Image (cartoon, helix red, strand yellow):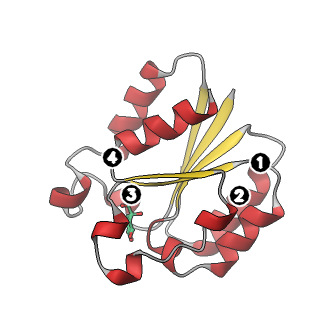
Amino acid sequence: MKLLIINGPNLNLLGKREPDIYGSQTFVTFFSELQMQFRNTELAYFQSNIEGELITQIQEADLVYDGIILNAAAYTHTSIAIGDAIKAVTVPVVEVHISNTFAREEFRHQSYISSHAKGVILGFGMQSYALAIQSFL
Ligand code: DQA
């Protein structure tokens, strides 16, 4: 099983960005924990602050990975183009969020990803990613 985790804008700042919401762990540290937890799963990680790079990565992952775990961050709420990219590929995408976006500002309640996703996991902190991996196993 080969899975690609894609993180969108500002998630490179995990650990120092709004730790009350997103926790104090960097994604790089968390990713090595995930690799230890899911030893039999091939995990890859990509992060970009640029919408087009996220789209290219989704396109390139098609037929290469068994699944994508996507936290499109703020683009979730704005990007028809990322939604279209998910629709255009056959690789299944699970949408994840660290925070419970429905318990936050109204503009975070809208997602252009969810209707094209295999499923959505949100609100469990960094464990949202682990739950998303489990959903593929
Ligand atoms: C987020 C939620 C988004 O609303 C926000 O813009 C993020 C992170 C989350 O993981 O909780 O950057 O996707």
- How far, Cα to Cα, is label 1 from label 4? 24 Å
Badge 1 local density, few (<14 within 10 Å), some, or many (20+)? many
Quadrant of residue 13 within the rendered picture: bottom left
Q: Label 3's element?
A: helix
Q: Name the residue under label 4.
A: 124
Q: Is mark 2 within 8 Å of ligand 1?
A: no
Mark 3: amino acid: Asn
- How far, Cα to Cα, is label 3 from label 4? 19 Å
Looking at the rendered image, the quarter that the C terminus falls into is top right
Mark 3 and mark 2 residues within 8 Å of each other at the beta carbon: no
Between circles 1 and 3, the one closer to the viewer is 1
Residue 18 in the image, given as x and y percentages of width and height: 20, 64
Q: In terms of sequence position, does the residue under pointer 2 or pointer 1 come before the other?
A: 2
Mark 2 and mark 1 residues within 8 Å of each other at the beta carbon: yes
Mark 2: amino acid: Ile
* Quarter of image, ligand 1: bottom left
Q: Mark 3 points at which residue?
A: 12
Mark 1: amino acid: Val
Q: In terms of sequence position, does the residue under pointer 3 or pointer 4 come before the other?
A: 3
Between circles 2 and 1, the one closer to the viewer is 1
Mark 4 and mark 2 residues within 8 Å of each other at the beta carbon: no
91 or 35, which lies in front?
Answer: 91
Q: Label 4's element?
A: loop
Q: In terms of sequence position, does the residue under pointer 1 or pointer 4 come before the other?
A: 1
